[in-house]
Amino acid sequence: MLQNGFLEMNKKVYKAIGAIIIKNNKILLIKRKNPPLGYACFAGHVDEGETFEKALIREVKEEGNLDITNYKQCFEGFIDGKYSTNNSGIYHWRLYQCKVKGELILDKNEAEIAEWFDLEKLKEIKLGKIWKILFTKINLLNDKNLNLKKQHQGKKL
């Protein structure tokens, strides 16, 4: 937890990434099969020695068989691990808005289904707790937000 801008020293810090994939004013979400349950974007831990960007590319490929063609970081911050898979520590999150190519083939060990949802109806979806927090932080649940809904010039791969 952050206290006066500093992380509590007794909590382990984990690194995590999330891939926000938006196309035609719709966002791609998976219904998680494992805790934390609910709808989420493709996401995962950053492995030891791996960069956030390499983890992003790996997780999107592993979970959805998609190749990232372009990405742009849209959030970085620390969130209490009580909303995460292992329910402990502190998570250093980075979210990226991504453009992808390829045929979506879902990893059925990770998710039940993948669906495209209208951004305007995002508040009505049963999001996982961490995704409610993350989407709130980037104003994606705010009707007035246009930042992620617009096309972007990200890093091409």
Image (cartoon, grey):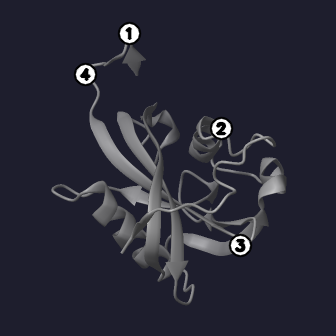
Circle nearer the viewer, 1 or 4 = 1
Kindly tell me whether residue 108 is visible in this rendering: no
Give the spatial CA distance, label 1 vs label 2: 22 Å
Q: Residue at x 41, y 54 (%)?
A: 17
Q: Is residue 2 left or right of residue 9?
A: right
Ranked by sequence position, the earlier of labels 2 and 4 is 4
Foreground: 150 or 92? Answer: 150
The residue labelled by disc 4 is 10
The residue labelled by disc 1 is 4
Q: Residue at x 35, y 33 (%)?
A: 89
Circle nearer the viewer, 3 or 4 = 3
Q: Position of residue 88 (x, y in %)?
A: 39, 35
Q: Residue at x 57, y 42 (%)?
A: 134
Q: Residue at x 62, y 42 (%)?
A: 129
Ranked by sequence position, the earlier of labels 1 and 2 is 1
- Is the residue under label 2 in contact with that under label 1 (CB below 8 Å)? no
Give the spatial CA distance, label 1 vs label 3: 40 Å
Q: Look at label 2 and name its amino acid.
A: Thr
The residue labelled by disc 2 is 136
Q: Secondary structure at mark 4?
A: loop
Q: Look at label 3 and name its amino acid.
A: Glu
Q: Look at label 4 and name its amino acid.
A: Asn
Ranked by sequence position, the earlier of labels 1 and 4 is 1
Give the spatial CA distance, label 3 vs label 4: 39 Å
Q: Secondary structure at mark 1?
A: loop
Q: Dividing the picture into quarters, in which one does residue 113 lie?
A: bottom right
Give the spatial CA distance, label 1 vs label 4: 15 Å
